[in-house]
Image: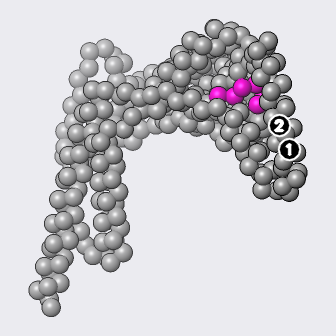
Amino acid sequence: MEFLYEYGLFFAKALTIVVAIVAVLVVVLATAVKQKSEKGELKLTNLSEELVDLKHHIKQELYTKKQFKAYEKELKAEQKQQEKDEEDKPKSRVFVIDFKGSIDAHEVSSLRREISAIIAIADVKDEVIVNVESGGGMVHGYGLASSQLDRLRQANIPLTICVDKVAASGGYMMACVANKIYAAPFAIVGSIGVVAQLPNFNRLLKKHEIDYEQHTAGNFKRTLTVFGENTDEGRDKFQQELEETHVLFKNFIHQYRPDLDLDTVATGEHWYGQQAIELGLIDAISTSDDVIMKLAETHTVIKVSYQIKKKLADKFAHGASLSVGAIFNKLAEKNQPLN
């Protein structure tokens, strides 16, 4: 029995190692393929039709047969009149984009394609709503995302930003570009500040008698380092760069919201929607659902999304990672050592 137990334990370890190696190889392969091509497709969804279908379904469930028959008759008459009216004066359109940003704001690659598509077909009678959800991240990533939104302003297409959960730091940098900002009552807004942090292992390396060398051409090619010994001069320069970035951030916000008291709001603090409206960070309290449903009464609302097509290797890599995770979880549940 002891032999079988040891053999089973050895087999489980070996299987775990093999699966882990295969998963790593697949991830590497998927990354290589992804770097060659990130083709996707533009998808348009008519939200106005979806809302009409939802309303129709609910009434079908709640109304009696007689009531529903009368409703359908009335609906057909309204649709016929609406079609006639739209022949003379077409409805204005509202284009909806969702932006859920990560730290590096890599989602901007899809955002730029969505905005390019809208600019190609929209005019000043139309409107764009962007649902922003982000706690911020890298300056250059969110700077580019904000510049993409500014393309709509430059094209004279009204831009509205809706914040249901959070638009802080880089997320608020994007939001401030809008002609109008809506936020839910407890959405997090603001955090107009700059932060950078890194560990330093220099003392640990010295303790174990490990030398670390870093060579640069230019006094401030590297201000702070993870492994080398930091200097007061480097720290001062690093702080100076943070302050300069903060000034650029504040100037950018002032460009779009000139009435905002930056001395009060550009402290790095964040506020909830109900507080943010008093400070002028947003223009109104509302969820994106309410904004869209109200506009759908008088506009054709279309959701625009650019979706990257997943390669077979990407799907396999995702599945392999889940499998490896499941194996590790099983082993952890049985309290068996991995080595």
Measuring from the top left, give residue 9's x and y in whole percent.
19, 76
Q: Quadrant of residue 190?
A: top right
Asked whether 296 falls inside the magenta stretch, the response is yes
Say whether residue 271 is left or right of residue 121.
right
User: In the rendered structure, are the residues bearing label 1 and label 2 in contact, judged by CB atoms less than 8 Å apart?
Assistant: yes
Residue indicated by mark 2: 75
- Residue ID at (19%, 60%): 17
Pick whichever, 325 or 280, lies toward us.
325
- Number of numbered tags placed on the structure image: 2
Say whether residue 124 is left or right of residue 99.
right
Measuring from the top left, give residue 5's x and y in whole percent.
17, 84
Measuring from the top left, give residue 195's x and y in whole percent.
53, 33
> 10 Å neighbourhood of mark 2: few (<14), some, or many (≥20)?
few
Instruction: Give the magenta range.
Output: 295-302
Q: Amino acid at mark 1?
A: Tyr
> 10 Å neighbourhood of mark 1: few (<14), some, or many (≥20)?
some
Say whether residue 103 is left or right of residue 84.
left
- Residue ID at (23%, 56%): 20
Res 193 visible: no
Give me the disc on residue 120. Answer: none
Label 1: which secondary element = helix
- Residue ID at (29%, 48%): 316
Label 2: which secondary element = helix
CA gap, disc 1 and disc 2: 6 Å
Q: In this rendering, is residue 14 above or below 210? A: below
Q: Quadrant of residue 323?
A: bottom left
Q: Quadrant of the C terminus?
A: bottom left
Q: Amino acid at mark 2?
A: Leu
